[in-house]
Amino acid sequence: IIPRSVYHFHPFISFQVQIMTNTIESVNAAVTLIIKAALLAARFFGRARKRNLKKLSKMDADEKDKELE
């Protein structure tokens, strides 16, 4: 780790640190978006499954057999 005081004297080091910071921020943003998308998809499929189960529970036995085939 390079002390901040060195950045002022060496512009190239400052540029490298800036690139690394931007890269880390980009990776963090990408990971956050992936996690949010996964949670949203899980929530959607959970609701869809719940709707299907409710629909099946309202049917009588013969209709269930037809639906499950």
Image (spheres, rainbow, N blue to C red):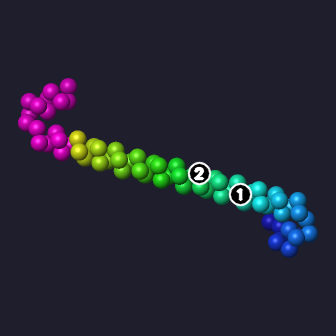
Pointer 1: what residue? Answer: 22
Q: In the image as oriented, which residue stretches furthest toward the bottom? A: 5
Structural crowding at the residue carrying mark 2, measured as other residues with C-alpha within 10 Å and reported as few (<14), some (14–19) or many (≥20)? few
Q: Position of residue 63 (x, y in %)?
A: 11, 31
Give the labeled residue for mark 2: 30
Q: Is residue 56 above or below residue 28?
A: above
Indicate whether residue 37 is drawn in magenta: no
Q: Quadrant of residue 64?
A: top left
* Predominant SS of the magenta segment: helix
* Residue at 29%, 44% in the rendered image: 48
For label 2, the SS is helix
Distance Cα–Cα, label 2 vs label 1: 12 Å
Q: Position of residue 40 (x, y in %)?
A: 41, 50
- Discs 2, 1 touching: Cβ within 8 Å: no
Query: Badge 1: how crowded within 10 Å, few (<14), some, or many (20+)?
Result: few
Residue 26 % position (x, y): 65, 54
Q: Position of residue 65 (x, y in %)?
A: 14, 29
Q: Earlier in the sequence, mark 2 or mark 1?
A: 1
User: Residue 47, relative to residue 14: is it above or below?
Assistant: above
Q: Quadrant of the N terminus?
A: bottom right
Start-end of magenta stretch: 53-69
Q: Amino acid at mark 1?
A: Asn
Label 1 secondary element: helix
